[in-house]
Structures are given as structure tokens and as C-alpha cells.
Image: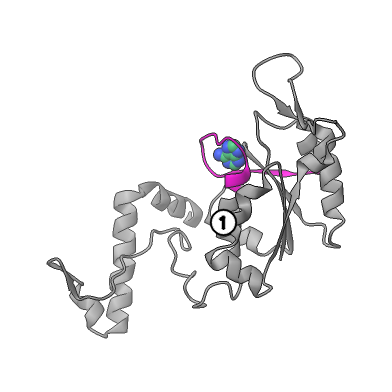
Amino acid sequence: MRIDILTLFPDMFESPLSCSIIKRAQDSGLVEIALTDIRDFSTDNYRKVDDKPYGGGPGMVMMPGPVFDCFEHVRKLSDEKGRVILLTPQGQKFDQAKALELSNEKRLIFIAGKYEGFDERIRIGLGAEQISIGDYVLSGGELAAMVIIDAVVRLLDGALGDEDSAKDDSFSEGLLEYPQYTRPEVFRGMKVPEVLLSGDHAKIAEWRRRQALERTKKWRPDLLKEIEKREN
Ligand code: ADE
């Protein structure tokens, strides 16, 4: 997979992209991630990339010119056209199903904007889909892009050490994950559930399934409603 990120703040990505699973996935060639600074495509002496909104109102809006020029430069960096994603609170809400869908693409191009928003012609002209990571407003799309990239890259075949470990994740079947325990067997008076020490794999699987269901019912009943909707 190739991931391109168009941003005004490439430095923000440095640390998240150079740690842990994302770093390993890049080092082993599973994914190539390239950052491009939109400001390099400003035609203005002051490297201006935003302006006041027509019709008045507060804040500044990303101008279409630098974003289009930057995008056209980036698109040519690979033969694969890619899927173009604009980060905005107006977008479709990101979830595990979307992460899985994106993990099957050969190329993703993220456009992260600061300020109050994008000139509408950016979305229309670039044929971009809009994604939001939740119903709150961030000061820019950068953190949203990082969240999505993290969720997507860990799903690439071979990104996780243990091939199975993404399968039981919370949400992978629409349920929260079952509780996990490791050594010691007793910690500050709290014991590991007996069934996990039993060695009876069928019983353990059954216990985990029940725990996952119970926790989902208690903490995220909205997820169970989603499953019911899907099954009916
Ligand atoms: N940019 C600002 N807020 C955002 C959000 N919630 N999701 C995606 N991009 C954003």
C-alpha cells in the first residue's frame, strides 16, 4: 500500500509514523507513507494558503489553488490513482468496517486541512470522499489522518506479529473484546478466572464469547442494536 498525506503540518506526523507497528510496517515494505507540504504549492510570496470566506463570517478557508496544485503533483508520484480522502467533521463517521475497507486499497491519499474548512471546490473538483473520526471538532485533519492510518495499517497482512491478533479485536465482529489476563495468577487479591487456567479450549472460547456479549450489553448497547439491524 502507498499512503500520501497532504498537510500544512508535516512535522506533526513525525513521531506517530516512526514508532511501533506503523514503523515496522514501513521498514518491512508493507506500506510506504509520503508527506507533502501544501504550503510548498502556494503562489504567494508569504506562502499563503487560506483566505477570508466569501459572504463574510469568522475564520479562514483553505484556498483551492495550492491544494489542487499539490494534489496534482502528488497523484503523479505513483501510477495507482488511489482513493482520495478529505478529513472533515462533515464526513462519514470512521469505524472498524471502514478501516477494513480502506486496508484493501492499493493507495490512499489523505488531505488534511487546518482552519475553518476547505473551499467547496476542493471536495467537488478532486472527487474526494469525506471522513470524520467523530462528532467533535479538531483544529485540523492531521490527527484524524493519523488515527485512520493507524487503524488501517495494523490490518495489513503481516503488520501484526501474530496473524490472529486483529481477528479478536473489539469491533471486529461488532462486539467489545473479552477480558484478558496475564501473569501473575493472583495480583493484589484479584484472581485470574478459573476457566482460563483449565486448558479446556472449548470452555474458554465459550466463556470469552459470553464475556464479550455481556460487556457489550453493559457498556455499548448501541453496538448490539447495530448487529440486530444487520441480521434482520
Ligand atoms: N477535522 C476537524 N475535525 C475533524 C474530525 N472530527 N474528523 C476528521 N477531520 C476533522
Residue 56: which quarter of the image? top right
Query: Is residue 82 at all visible to an observer of this figure?
Result: yes
Give percent across and percent down for residue 195: 22, 77
Q: Is residue 122 magenta?
A: no
Residue 191: which quarter of the image? bottom left
Element type where label 1 sits in the image: helix
User: On the picture, is 215 further left or further right than 71?
Assistant: left
Residue found 40% across the figure and 46% down from its top:
222
Give percent across and percent down for residue 115: 65, 31
Give percent across and percent down for residue 51: 76, 24
Residue found 34% across the figure and 62% down from its top:
212
Seen in the picture, residue 86 relative to 58 is either above or below; the reply is below
Seen in the picture, residue 34 relative to 8 is either above or below; the reply is below
What span is colored magenta in the figure? 125-144
Q: Nearer the viewer, residue 175 or 41?
A: 41
User: On the picture, is 181 further left or further right than 99?
Assistant: left
Seen in the picture, residue 173 relative to 194 is either above or below; the reply is above
Q: Quadrant of the N terminus?
A: bottom right
Query: Is residue 154 at all visible to an observer of this figure?
Result: no
Give percent across and percent down for residue 47: 80, 34
Amino acid type indicated by mark 1: Pro
Residue found 85% across the figure and 31% down from its top:
44
Which residue position holds label 1? Answer: 16
Q: Nearer the viewer, residue 17 or 207?
A: 17
| Mark 1 nearby-residue class (10 Å; few <14, some 14–19, many ≥20) | some
Q: Is residue 131 magenta?
A: yes
Residue found 25% across the figure and 77% down from its top:
196
Q: How many marks?
A: 1
